[in-house]
Image (cartoon, rainbow, N blue to C red):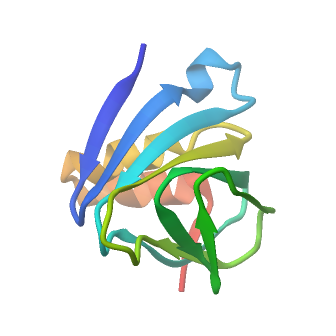
Amino acid sequence: MTETLRLSGGTTVTVLLAAEQTNGTLSLLELELEPGAGAGPHRHTREDETIVVLRGALRVFDVTLRSGEVIHLPRGVTHSFANEGPELVRALFVCTPGGLERFFRAAVSGNQETLDAAIREAGLEFD
C-alpha cells in the first residue's frame, strides 16, 4: 500500500515500501520535484541513499543526472539535490536501512517537536 506526502516547496513523496514492510532493511520512495524544488546541503548518518532518476534532470552535487542515471550516496556524505529545469522531476530514492519516510511524515505533520524528534531518529544533519 502506497502513501503520498505533499511537502511545502513543491515536493511530493510517495512511500512505495516503508521500513515496516521490509523489516527495517530499506525504504523505497518516489519523489516528484516541481521546478525549483529540492533539498539543501545535508547528510545522513544512519543510511545510504541511492537515487535513480526516472524523468527530467536532477542536480546532485555539481552533477546533473538525467532519466535512467543513478547515483549512490554513502552515509556521511554531505549532498544536496534540486530540480533546476523547467519540467517535473521523478526519482526513486532507495534508503538502507529503512526509516527515512518517518522524517517526511513528520515534515507534513506541522508539529515542530515531532519533526525535531524525526530528524534525530533519522540521523539527519543539515548544513
Percent from the top left, x then y, of residue 77? 75, 74
Image quadrant holding the N terminus, namely top left
Picture layout, residue 5 above or below residue 90: above
The one nearer the camera, 111 or 38, is 38
The one nearer the camera, 41 or 117, is 41
Q: Classify residue 2 as left or right of residue 25.
A: left
Percent from the top left, x then y, of residue 87? 32, 63
Picture layout, residue 22 above or below residue 118: above
| Count of numbered tags | 0
Q: Classify residue 111 as left or right of residue 116.
A: left
Percent from the top left, x then y, of residue 3? 35, 26
Percent from the top left, x then y, of residue 67? 58, 54
The one nearer the camera, 87 or 116, is 87
Q: Which residue is drawn at 59% across and 62% down?
A: 66
Q: Residue at x 52, y 67 (%)?
A: 58
Q: Residue at x 31, y 33 (%)?
A: 4
Q: Which residue is drawn at 30% across and 69% down?
A: 35
Taking the view exactly as shown, the residue that stands out farthest to the top is 1
Picture layout, residue 71 above or below residue 83: above
